[in-house]
Image: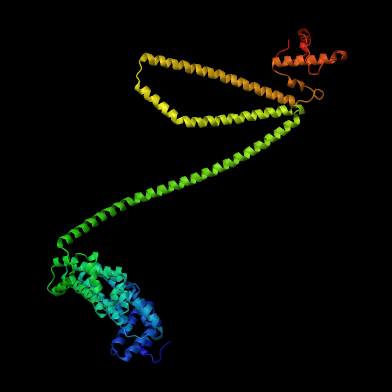
Amino acid sequence: MKPTGTDPRILSLAAEVAKSPEQNVPVILLKLKEIINNTPLGSSELKKIKQDIYCYDLIRYCLLVLSQDCSRIQGGWTTISQLTQILSHCCVGLEPGEDAEEFYNELLPSAAENFLILGRQLQTCFINAAKGEEKDELLHFFQIVTDSLFWLVGGHVQLIQNVLQSDHFLHLLQTDNVQIGSTVMNMVQNILQINSGDLLRIEAKTLHSILDEVIFKLLSTPSPVLRSTATKLLLLMAESHQEILILLRLSACYKGLRSLLNKQKPGTDFRHEFRQLISLLSPKVYQEVEEQKLHQAACLIQAYWKGFQTRKRLKKLPSAVITLQRNFRSKRAKILLKLKRQKEEEDNRLQLQLERQRAMRLSREIRLNMLEIVHPGQVEKHNREIEEKSALIIQKHWRGYRERKNFHQQKPSLVEYKAAVTLQRASSQMSDVASRELHSQAQERLQHYFMGRALEDRAEQHREALKAQISTNIEQLMKAPSLKEAEGKEPELFLSRSRPVAAKAKQAHLTTLKHIQAPWWKKLGEEAEDEIDVPKDELSIELGTLFIGGTKPP
């Protein structure tokens, strides 16, 4: 809501800002400085003008301009430094009214952060500047920005904690430049003189960083100006807060600080503050100088050793990472290979199970077909043969399992026996004649063994061939049709290739024919299964009419 009775200069300026292009806005905003300077300080009219500036968002315009790149702003750092003064003066003593929460929680912290960012940019430009006049001008602008920040923090003490915890502030404090460092520490000293209570509200890490930097400048900087400023700031911090004094006395981080300060030669302008700081840091229980030296030496050795170990680990880090990746990939490949093998084994097991089931079904079907073909009188004999074959197979597998088991049980003894033989062979010394004799005997026995084994293998093959032939003949005979149903050359398929079998068959055939042709009175008292002797001359009568398998006709 726009206030009533707005200053016409503010209205005109706000309208001009709204209508002007972006590049002209910074120069237009500089007119606020003239308006503020022409108004009496501390008057109600100045408060009203600040409220009007805030209500018409001219303060936000200033923040937007300060957040831009300085190279795009007309007038460069001159315009920026004047805008920081305008912004700080407008924010101090302002009563925002209904927008108080937004003003205190967003606008003011943003303004303080922008001031610190501008300080860092000026610090960079100052360090990179080559000319002395340019350096002086940039240093002047840096002091204006820090003064504006101090004026803003002085009017709003709640910003002290934000400023001290900012990373940009720590970067400004850690500079090696004498002018920049002394300006920043003077600003910190002035801020702590206003309200030092916020120093303990910041994080412990940030507080240690500030103390470390101040002590570093006090002990390591050759500039007397910087050392003087650091001494005064550290003395102010120690005197303001007992907790900081205890930290400097008893903390392991600052152990030996008093002895280092005693070795320093203070200048004439800060000798009194320097002695005050040393007296404050004197502990109640004083340790011997030698112990401090030994402790410092141990810390130095540890620092060098830890640094060496860290650098060594960093050098080995790439190879360690490569080794870790290699091991991980190898382990992953092994796991995948194991899973693949397990899957293959499972598939093979299922496939084997299916093949066994299929083979079992096929075997049962063959047995059923055989039972249909086999004569009822031969069923029992056929089943007995199958049972014998099954028993032989079971016995064969059981004996193989038993022998393998016995071999594995006797394997340690066999190893011991071979070792003993090796030792005996190595220990005993034989003559050349005995060695040749033993070698010839071993060769003869080995030759005899192989010859006997070859004969046994041939005999076994012959037996297996005969068994297979007999089995085939039996199966063909069992499947053969009767003589009445035989046609063409089917009877010739069942001629035996064995001479004894053919002779036996011929004899049985002739006996059957003679028995059939005999008169009935001769058959009295004879049984059907009794064999009838047939003379050899009668047997050879019809020899030419019967084919004997495996022979040629005469």
The reply, left or right, for residue 463 in relation to residue 420 is right
Q: Can you say which quadrant of the picture contains the C terminus? A: top right
Residue located farthest toward the front when viewing the structure as drawn: 525
The residue positioned 14% from the left and 75% from the top of the image is 272
Residue 13: x and y in percent read 36, 85
Color encoding of the figure: rainbow
Asked if residue 166 is positioned above or below residue 475 in the image, the reply reads below
Residue 455 vertical placement versus 32 (above, below) = above
The percent coordinates of residue 188 (x first, y second) are 25, 75
| Residue 546 shown left or right of residue 352 in the figure | right
Residue 222, quarter of picture: bottom left
Residue sitting at x 73%, y 14%:
503
Viewer-proximal residue, 503 or 57? Answer: 503
Is residue 140 visible in the rendered structure shown here? no
Q: Position of residue 271 (x, y in %)?
A: 13, 73
At horizontal 57% and vertical 42% (from top left) the residue drawn is 347
Looking at the picture, does residue 481 appear above or below residue 123?
Answer: above
Location of residue 310 (image quadrant):
bottom left
